[in-house]
Image (tube, rainbow, N blue to C red):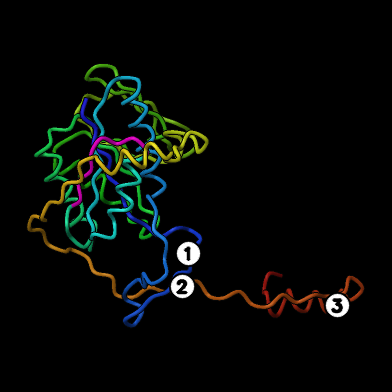
Amino acid sequence: MKILVCISHVPDTTSKINFINGDSEFDTNGVQFVINPNDEFGLTRAIWFKEQQGANVTVVNVGGADAEATLRKALAIGADEAIRVNANPTDGFFVAKQLAEVVKNGSYDLVIAGKESLDYNGGMVPGMLAALTGNDFVNSCIGLDINGTTAKAVREIDGGKETISANLPLVIGGQKGLVEEKDLRIPNMRGIMTARTKALTILEPVGADNTTKAVKFEKPAAKSAVKLVSPDNLDELINLLHNEAKVI
């Protein structure tokens, strides 16, 4: 079984976020980048299939040379090879178009992507990728087993879970639950050294239109200072709740 895991190169959640060029572009200065958490759950599940069923695991990213460190980490975790499409991931359709080309040329049985990336939260790429390749699609996937050419997937729905049977090839939009956080892999020294010898192929992008464009980003408004009211001063508390907080 050939598995392709789509990897997004996203800011660490502890990074301080700022914008430049009239708040239309993300400022990458001083930002630490990591594997997108939803993608890391998918990668870990793919490595499980490798260990238990002998699957071959390839990771792919659409991005610049700065993303190669993230791909090398995926290789150190256990992926067999990596592909980087040398293009700026400008919008969801553009990224899906690049990934679809990789899928078509690689004849993959299973494609695992995170249901959304941590930075833009678009949630578009896995579904568009499935449509472009003509493969079945399961989103919000929290469980996956493969038996021959048949997959049994569990997806999260409002108020419960849904179990689905589908045939390979298949595209999965994964999230937490596909594996648990305690099962995530931390690269060891042997994995890091081995990753240096694994293939990292760079592909040039195929032509694709940018269908959307970021116009402006806005950070949440700063929280106002906390006002402390003496427990003996109920009149002042009621006044603040009524006239400032406007909750009563």
- The residue pinned by badge 1 equals 15
Quadrant in the picture for residue 42: top left
CA distance separating discs 2 and 1 = 14 Å
Report the residue at 17% width, 35% height from top: 135
User: Which secondary structure, mark 1?
Assistant: loop
Q: Is residue 233 left or right of residue 155?
A: right
Residue that mark 2 sits on: 219
The residue sitting at the bottom extreme is 22
- Please name the residue shown 16% across and 64% down the image: 210
**Residue at (14%, 37%) from the top-left corner?**
134
Element at badge 2?
A: loop
Residue labelled with disc 3: 235
Q: CA distance from mark 2 to mark 3?
A: 35 Å
Q: Please name whichever residue, 2 or 171, is drawn nearer the observer in this view of the structure.
A: 2
**Which residue is painted at 39% across and 53% down in the image?**
34
- Residue nearest the observer in this picture, 218 or 61: 61
Q: Quadrant of residue 24?
A: bottom left
